[in-house]
Image (spheres, rainbow, N blue to C red):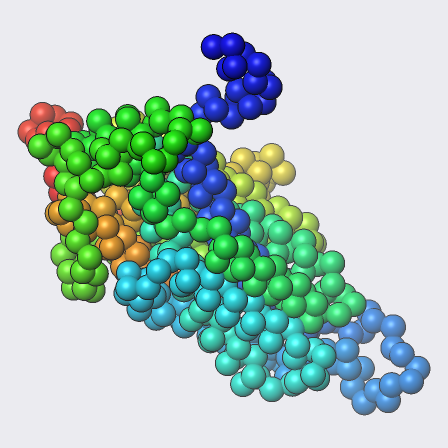
Amino acid sequence: MKMKSSLAPGIRLITNFSRDSWYRGFILILTFLFYTAYHLSRKPISIVKSELHRNCSNVIQPKDINITNNVTWCDWPPFDQDNYQTLFGVLDNCFLVAYAIGMFFSGIFGERLPLRYYLSIGMLMSGLFTCLFGLGFYWNIHSLGYYAFVQVMNGLVQTTGWPAVVACVGNWFGKGKRGFIMGVWNSHTSVGNILGSLIAGVFVSTAWGLSFIVPGIIIACTGVLCFFFLVEKPEDVNCSSPQHHSGQERSQEVGETAPLLRDSSIVDPSINGAVSTEPDVIVEEHSEAISFLGALRIPGVVEFSLCLLFAKLVSYTFLYWLPLYISNVAHFEAKEAGDMSTLFDVGGILGGILAGLVSDYTGGRASTCCVMLVVAAPMLFLYNNIGQRSLGTTIGMLLLCGALVNGPYALITTAVSADLGTHESLKGNARALSTVTAIIDGTGSIGAALGPLLAGVISPTGWNNVFYMLISADVLACLFLSRLVYKEAQRWCGCGPRARGFNEL
């Protein structure tokens, strides 16, 4: 006791937390940084578009340049043509379609390769292709094929990120608080978008190539960080495995109370999952990776995948078209419309956290998603009809719609994917998480590619029709969850055992 009282207050605070808690916090922060870097490197193209095609009549003409066209002299070929919006759409879809296709294969590779190596290589390659897009400025490249190829390759290597980071976080966190923890953790998407916009904006008017090169260097550096510091599983550092099923509660409690400074040579065997006195605890870890069809047979995977397709369709339509909608309907300037559209992302962060909290408390992931989607449909209708009447109304409706639209999307891609990837039907196979995550997010990415494309086709007929399309997508997303919602309702009414996650589905 005398030696303990002589410790500095800061050291006493550190040792009050368990060894497991420090490692889990470290992994959460590390994976947050990794996926922030992924989104940070995706954002520059949306900022640079305005520089690739400008209103040259407002730009001072240099005296030493022979100008033959006063309208497009300052544009970057091939984006100086009248169909520049179509060309920008080609670049967007090259990334999104490649990302959607690659995601289905990414999880399969992720299950069979060490996550540390997989993530590190993915971030290094993503940094390379992001830089190659920016180097087109310095190499004076004006070929659409070059930029389209870079976008396709970047879309493919970016698929390494999501299945791997969700699998890693799922390995470290059990179901008890998974919804809340992952709801907070999922804000990396918005943080990455904001940082990517700020960094790209610094260089866009002077040398737009740096708007890509700097984020490319950043994500490459995080790849190096991943290689040196990522710990894939608690067992690798003698920490306790998380509580994936109810029988593991005892071992989880023991691990949570293990002091930070305890001697690793005398760690209780039950903490490492080697020995257990609990009959329900599944301690065998199957080494065989799950197949694609095997992952599809996990109860709930197909339903949540199809639900995410339509939920992500709505979310990405707002991501790509909301600034233009605000500018056209509310008559805001481009910068003001862009700033205002960020409120939708702020609402999404709040919605993701709320969805996680509610689903943790109720044990109903599907019901939480369904309720938010049901409420989102009339809110989208109201936003289109009354959302632009005043500044206060616009702010309030954007926050509300952002929460209701992105809340289910965030919950499905994080906590739901982790729950299904550790489903009890897998009987301890810990290598299914990456494949399940890839299937769910890959299916959702099809919607992410379709949404902006459909909005571009429908918007010339009127914004009302775009919102009818979004409302229809919300309704369809709810319908795909109806069976799971029914099962959860049965459990709550006493027709089945109450449990968190999807063990009874």
Please indicate, yes or no, whether residue 39 appears anywhere in the rendered image: no
Residue at 43% x, 38% y: name it: 23
Residue 103 screen position, x and y as percent: 35, 65
In the picture as drawn, the residue positioned furthest to the top comes out as 2
Pick the front one: 392 or 423 = 423
Pick the front one: 439 or 493 = 439
Residue at 83% x, 87% y: name it: 67
Residue 335 screen position, x and y as percent: 69, 54
Q: Is residue 89 left or right of residue 304?
A: right
Residue at 53% x, 20% y: name it: 12
In the picture as drawn, the residue positioned furthest to the right comes out as 63
Q: Quadrant of residue 290?
A: bottom left
- How many numbered circles are shown? 0
Does residue 135 sit above or below 480 in this rendering?
below
Pick the front one: 179 or 457 = 179
Does residue 151 sit above or below 349 in this rendering?
below
Residue at 15% x, 60% y: name it: 294
